[in-house]
Amino acid sequence: MAEIIQKDGTWLFDGDAVRIVPGNDKTVSPLRAALGEIAVPLEALAGISFEAGRKAGRLRLRLRDGADPLLQIAAGRLGESSDPYRLTVEKDRSGVAEYLVDEVRNALLLEGVESGPVDRYLLPGPALPITASAGDGTVTFDGERLRLEWNWKTEESKSSGGPRTLALADVESVEWQPSAGLDNGYIRFRVARAPASVRPKYDPYAVELWGFKKDPLMALAGAAVVARLPHPYASADTGTEAEPGPADSPGPGGEDHDALLRRLRELGELHQAGILTAEEFATAKQAVLKRL
């Protein structure tokens, strides 16, 4: 087990998942505080790194594309302070951070975790029910129904229609765009019957955002909805899968024999290159042999 505790938060790796708990420091963003503890399974990780700095360093987790509904809706637009997969590390704790990185990387190697995209969410998204208020409205979602309510800052043509309630089945997609420069941001819930060209300021299925501190909370509300919509990378083929032929048939342990042999060769190469110690190589090799 590897653990690092900082004012910014705590990261703990238990061999199966990296557990992230936001800190109580006043610099912790509203998004990270509202999201709370996250357990990132090993299979969701594409990598981990530590960047040393003159005064402080940064730990970063890189998740596989499509693994997390929050990152899916954010599409790389989350600010540094709101990124739950970044941890500020004090200079005197650099050694601990580097040890955690080594532990996670070794586990990824030993388990043969791929770094490519996935076709299902490996994280559940924000806990329900969830309510977020920012910009000109409030979004509430309980897993089945979505409600949009307006405040005194809402354009009259939008607020005059009253609150809007949508069933999850009516939502086709969710768009979140933070404000940038002079352009306002928004979160928009696309429904089949609504025109696509309406500006968020007037759209009764959108909340307009102005770049204030709580705006990223709308990304959490959007992620909670996205987590329950069809995965964007899932196969469109919903028919019955074909029966495996002789070349596809798994071995006695339920896994492809050739794939396990390839894994053995990879482990041998890692050991010869000095990446795996003799003890790590023996442990990993025994685990693969048991599956043959």
Image (cartoon, rainbow, N blue to C red):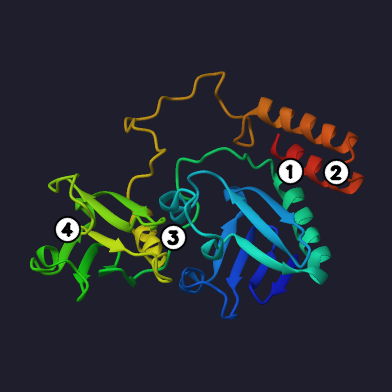
- Per the model, the C-alpha gap separating discs 1 and 2 is 9 Å
Q: Earlier in the sequence, mark 1 or mark 2?
A: 1
Q: Earlier in the sequence, mark 3 or mark 2?
A: 3
Q: Which residue is mark 1?
A: 109
Mark number displayed over residue 249: none
Q: Position of residue 50 (x, y in %)?
A: 73, 56
Q: Which residue is mark 4?
A: 202
Mark number displayed over residue 125: 3
Q: Earlier in the sequence, mark 4 or mark 2?
A: 4
Element on which disc 3 rests: loop
The amino acid pointed to by label 4 is: Tyr
- Per the model, the C-alpha gap separating discs 1 and 3 is 26 Å
Q: Position of residue 191 (x, y in %)?
A: 19, 49
Element on which disc 1 rests: helix
- Per the model, the C-alpha gap separating discs 4 and 2 is 59 Å
Q: Nearer the viewer, residue 133 or 264?
A: 133
Q: Is residue 184 found left or right of 88 in the rendered image?
A: left
Q: From the viewer's perspective, is the residue at label 3 or at label 2 nearer?
A: 3
Quadrant, the C terminus: top right
Q: Which residue is mark 2?
A: 276
Circle 1/circle 2 CB separation < 8 Å: yes
The amino acid pointed to by label 1 is: Leu
The amino acid pointed to by label 2 is: Leu
Quadrant, the N terminus: bottom right
